[in-house]
Amino acid sequence: MSLNVIALGGNAILDKDPSDEGQKAVVAQAARYIADFVEKGEKVIVCHGNGPQVGNLLLQQKAGESEKNPQLKLDSCVAMTQGSIGYWLQNALINEFATRQAHPSVISLVTQVRVDPADPSFERPSKPVGPFYSEEEANVAMAANGGVYQEDAGRGYRKVVPSPKPQEIVEKEAIKTLVDAGVITICAGGGGVPVVRNDNGFTGVEAVNDKDFTASVLAKDVQADRLIILTGVDNIYINYNQPNQQALGEISVAQAKGYIEEGHFAAGSMLPKIEAAIDFVEEDAARTAIITSIEKLAELDQHTGTILRK
């Protein structure tokens, strides 16, 4: 029985229907695939993205803002969406297993992820979050809260925040205990709540962590056998959408780095997944990273998806 960290994207959850019920329906379908995988004898930890969900929450915060109802900071919003998406997944998995006359324990855990306060992204925030503002509104907001707002693709100004590299899962020992007890654990949602260590312990910061990089750190922290990154395609490709497009099967770290240097992977989509996979496997030849679609999750023993080894 191998231990697998599964990273599920937030965009896939939002899909075409951003309503509460629409997202729950997508999560219910994901739960069926995860349950199929567990029934094959696999142990799993589930991570998930929250990019569009936390963006929507920030819009709601702005719309309802008043003197008596101020906007919450980004770390709190990350925690809130961790809680909501974690609840959807927990509920869906419990219900799915019940239909199969199985009753494994399932829990979702609000998770903090330590980042380095000296990470260069804090000096050069670049990750857009939340609503669009006019230039005048952005200047007012900058004067009021000291944030950084930048023009975004001609659509207006948005707040930009740091996206530091995750260093450590604060609750890793609790996660290990849960997994060792046979509990299906949902954690590190949205890349986890970014925190820095100081004299008072840990303090949340205005930043967002990349979900795939956090999943890689988590997989190493809990000594997982496999990191499984689920995306919208069955394999990753070189020359994507070109006449000479090629699906990649099993590749080495050296090959993956070569494809990165050749510019095959887009920075905003596939590149961080490849980099997270490399980060997980290159230290230990016993580890495997797989990038594929959720529909292929239960077929991994048939060597589906793109498999990365040292």
Image (cartoon, grey):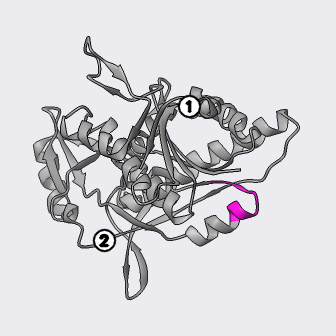
Residue placed farthest to the right in the image? 101
Residue 116 is marked as 2
The amino acid type of the residue labelled 2 equals: Asp
* Front position among marks 2 and 1: 1
Residue placed farthest to the bottom in the image? 199
Q: Residue at x 44, y 61 (%)?
A: 193
Q: Which of 8 and 23 is in front in this view?
A: 8
Q: Mark 1 points at which residue?
A: 303
Q: Nearer the viewer, residue 234 or 97?
A: 234
Is-magenta flag for residue 233? Answer: no
Q: Residue at x 14, y 47 (%)?
A: 150
- Horizontal and vertical percent for residue 65? 36, 52
The quadrant where residue 91 appears: top right
- State if disc 1 and disc 2 touch (CB < 8 Å): no
Q: Is residue 97 left or right of residue 110?
A: right
- Horizontal and vertical percent for residue 229? 48, 41
Q: Which element type, helix, strand or loop, lies under badge 2?
A: loop
Image: 267 above or below 118: above
- Horizontal and vertical percent for residue 226? 55, 49
The amino acid type of the residue labelled 1 equals: His
